[in-house]
Image (cartoon, helix red, strand yellow):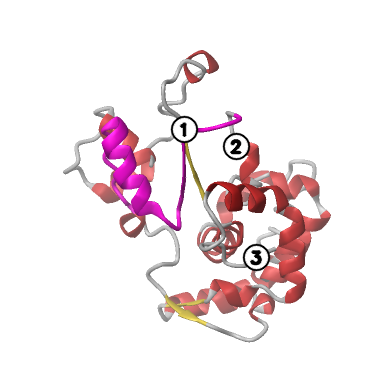
Amino acid sequence: MRYSVDIANGIWDANSNKQWTTNVSGHGLFKPDLRYQLRNEYAFVILRCPFARLASAFLDQFNRRPHSYLTYRHQDGVMAKLLDPAARHLVNFEKFVKKLESNWKFLHVNAHWSPQVEFLLYEDYDDYFSVEKFGKAVDTLEKKIELKIYDMRKTSKHGIDGFKKVSITNAHKLNVNDIISMRKKGEIINPQSLFSQEMYDVVCKLYDADIKLYKEKIGEETLMFEC
């Protein structure tokens, strides 16, 4: 979305080097203050299935860019134990989720896994879209506000869509080293495999508000699980 907004505002040309522009797109740009946010004529938000979002945060962000989180190591000790460089490779999804459950600050410290309801600025939006039905957002935004959406996930190599999904028993216990080895072979854990009954129960509790919002605004058919 940041790249699309940049294009719409003339920061980049659509024919620019996409790999380079996606690396710097949106950082510090186009952050209106409250005066302008309160005067807008149209507001939309893009939600994501809370289960898929958390699985992606672990399988993609946590494994691909671990050092981006090390900046928080000295913030009241929130990240130090889990993301110590030497111990990072021993972390698995189970430890990750239990850390979210036991440490309120850790749950809220990173935008990739903080509850989505915390980012909502308005009580209600004109349109609610979802990552799972992204095509609807593409069509609607171009029709309503003439915003052309460029899907840059493959170019930026974000996400796990380009990997072969493998279902594994007790996948929540595979550590970062195991996942890195799989990624090198073009494979990734099927996100659903990460959720043992215990992991499912914890996520339902931690992200209850997100799940309720998603059900209300998007529907249940694209939720990974029901709670």
The C terminus - image quarter: bottom right
Residue 114, numbered circle: none
Q: Position of residue 177 (x, y in %)?
A: 59, 75
Residue at image x 61%, y 45%? Answer: 116
The residue carrying pointer 1 sits among few (fewer than 14), some (14 to 19) or many (20 or more) residues within 10 Å by Cα, namely few
Q: Quadrant of residue 163?
A: bottom left
Q: Amino acid at mark 3?
A: Glu
Q: Tell me the magenta residue range.
A: 123-152
User: Mark 1: which secondary structure?
Assistant: loop
| Residue closest to the eye, 40 or 101 | 40
Q: Which of the pair 220/107 is nearer the observer? A: 220
Residue type at numbered disc 1: Asp
- In primary-sequence order, the first of circles 2 and 1 is 2
Q: Residues within 10 Å of mark 3 (few under 14, many from 20)?
A: few
Q: To which residue does mark 3 refer?
A: 226
Q: Amino acid at mark 2?
A: Phe
Q: As rendered, which of 8 and 16 lies closer to the eye?
A: 8
Q: Per the image, is 205 magenta?
A: no
Q: Is residue 125 above or below residue 63?
A: above
> Mark 2 highlights which residue?
119
Rendered location of residue 171, percent (x, y): 63, 79
Whether pointer 2 and pointer 1 mark residues with C-beta atoms closer than 8 Å, the reply is no
Of the numbered discs 1 and 3, the one sitting upstream in the chain is 1
Q: Which mark is residue 126?
A: 1
In the foreground, 157 or 33: 33
In the displayed image of the protein, which residue is found farthest to the top? Answer: 35
